[in-house]
Image: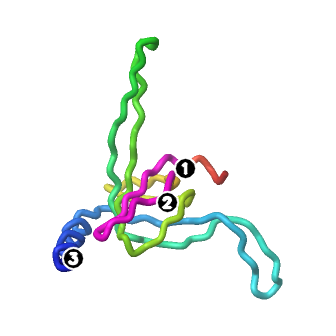
Amino acid sequence: MKWVEDMVRKELESRYTGVCSVYEYGGQTDPVTHITSHGERLVLENQPCRVSFGSLSAASEKSGAAAVKQSVKLFISPDVSVKSGSKITVTQNGVTAEYAASGVPAVYPTHQEIMLELFRGWA
């Protein structure tokens, strides 16, 4: 039932209110000098997406206050490839933030979901 997947995908993508750019870190060889330099390179630009925020709390009987951790999930087209560890710059609702793809994407026929964490630099 491909038409159902297409309808669901179209509906999901109509809710994308942000755009993202994806960067990977690695070696790049200059075609003229044949010198390899390492750095980040843009692999995807202005890709429609949506970021969803949630809260996870972990309480412990020993501590007086519960620790609260924010979960950040990126929804994006299943047609693009985002490697684990990539840097992702997202602009949504007028706010731009840098994240790192913290794991392997969950890819579905209609979209993919990528858990994010704040980008703290290249490892």
Q: Which of marks 1 and 3 is nearer the N terminus?
A: 3
Do the CB atoms of the residues marked 1 and 2 lie less than 8 Å apart? yes
Camera-side mark, 2 or 3: 3
The three-letter code of the residue at mark 1 reads Phe
- Kindly identify the residue that appears in the image at 45 percent across and 51 percent down: 116
Element type at mark 2:
strand
The three-letter code of the residue at mark 3 reads Asp
- Kindly identify the residue that appears in the image at 16 percent across and 74 percent down: 4
Q: How crowded is mark 1: few (under 14 residues within 10 Å), some or many (20 or more)?
A: some
**Measured from the top left, where is residue 15 in percent x and y?**
23, 63
Residue annotated with mark 2: 88
- Kindly identify the residue that appears in the image at 71 percent across and 74 percent down: 28
Residue annotated with mark 3: 6
**Measured from the top left, where is residue 46 in percent x and y?**
42, 71
Tell me if residue 109 is in the magenta stretch. Answer: yes
In the rendered image, the vertical position of residue 5 relative to residue 83, given as above or below:
below
Q: Earlier in the sequence, mark 2 or mark 3?
A: 3
Scheme by which the image is coloured: rainbow
**Measured from the top left, where is residue 68 in percent x and y?**
40, 29
Residue 119 badge: 1
Q: Distance between the residues labelled 2 and 3?
A: 26 Å
The part of the chain drawn in magenta is: 102-118
Element type at mark 1:
loop
Q: Residues within 10 Å of mark 2 (few under 14, many from 20)?
A: many
